[in-house]
Image (cartoon, rainbow, N blue to C red):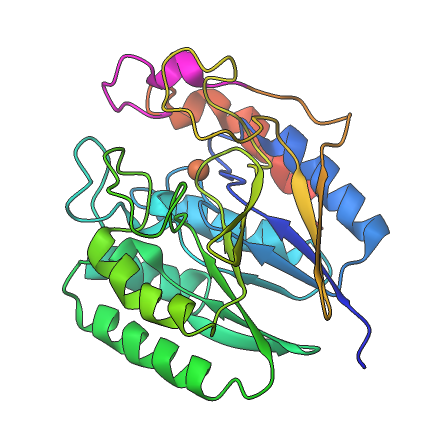
Amino acid sequence: MTASSFIAFISDPHLSEERPFFQFNWEILVDELSQRRPDLVLVGGDLALDGANNPSDLWFARRQLERLGCPWLAVPGNHDVGDLTKAATSEAAVTEERRNRYLETIGRDFWSFDIGDWRIIGLNSMILTSGFAAEAEQERFLARSIGEAGSRQVALLSHMAVCDAALSEVDTTGWFVPSESRDMLGAYFRAGKIQLCLSGDMHQSRDRTIEGIRHVWAPSTAFVTDMREEWRPKFGGRKRVGWTEVRLGKDIEVTMHEPRRMVDFDIGNWVHDGTGLYYEFACGSRFAGFGTAAKQIAP
Ligand SMILES: [Fe+2]
């Protein structure tokens, strides 16, 4: 029997050299993981503050991930490649050009990685229902990766969460994998081919077993939104910044970490009025000094 693998599951660091609002928490995370030395870091997307519009944010995120000093694998979020085509109202929509920029900067957006007795499959949830050739390619890749998993247990990693309370639910919030794509995944769930779903995006931590499958949401390492739950939909998670320790062996062990040195920044006031001007109010030059400081911190 293989010993369990120690995975640090992090998400939504929202990194930017020009607007390094959340660099403080990132520095604490880098420090903490350098001491804890995980076997692998999984990143649940939104690496960049606004990579869909600012390629430099993605490059900066890449450089920051390399500071972790251990193997890492990431999937893209809406702030890296744009949002689902049909959901993107106020934010940038996913395009092939934005996706290609991610591939050039960060690496593959869907992939499979074996660790111990587990196979982890990363998916780009932002291209679901896009109709891009890559969407069909990803579906074929998923089928092949699951088909060839053998005796390994399978974990999926995606930016978007699969569902709130039931695979068959009708999502009226737009926060979950679109129903067409959930039907595609559902066949694997029903056949017992997937044991664990890891996702980010929600900026809250949650660990639930739904219809026999474990669904773990990583909190953001950067910020929360509407911590007091005054206006956002409630999904029952815990809104604090931090990271998630996932031990994969015969069983799945999950421990949420909320380092006391991190600050629970709440950006609810930025986004509450629905104008969609996420982070855009600040002009880059105003933060040039911070950017320089962040660069100096990086080796
Ligand atoms: Fe995010």
Please name whichever residue, 187 or 202, is drawn nearer the observer in this view of the structure.
187
The residue drawn where x is 46% and y is 55% is 211
* Quadrant in the rendering for residue 232: top left
Q: Position of residue 81 (x, y in %)?
A: 31, 51
Q: Quadrant of the N terminus?
A: bottom right
Q: Is the magenta region chiefly helix, strand or loop?
A: loop
Please name whichever residue, 157 or 184, is drawn nearer the observer in this view of the structure.
184
Reply yes or no: does residue 260 show up in magenta: no
Q: Looking at the image, which residue sits at the far right?
A: 35
The residue drawn where x is 29% and y is 58% is 182
Q: Is residue 293 above or below residue 134?
A: above
Q: Is residue 219 above or below residue 5?
A: above
Q: Is residue 218 visible?
A: no
Horizontal side, residue 52 vs residue 289: left or right: left
Number of disc labels? 0
Q: Is residue 155 visible?
A: yes
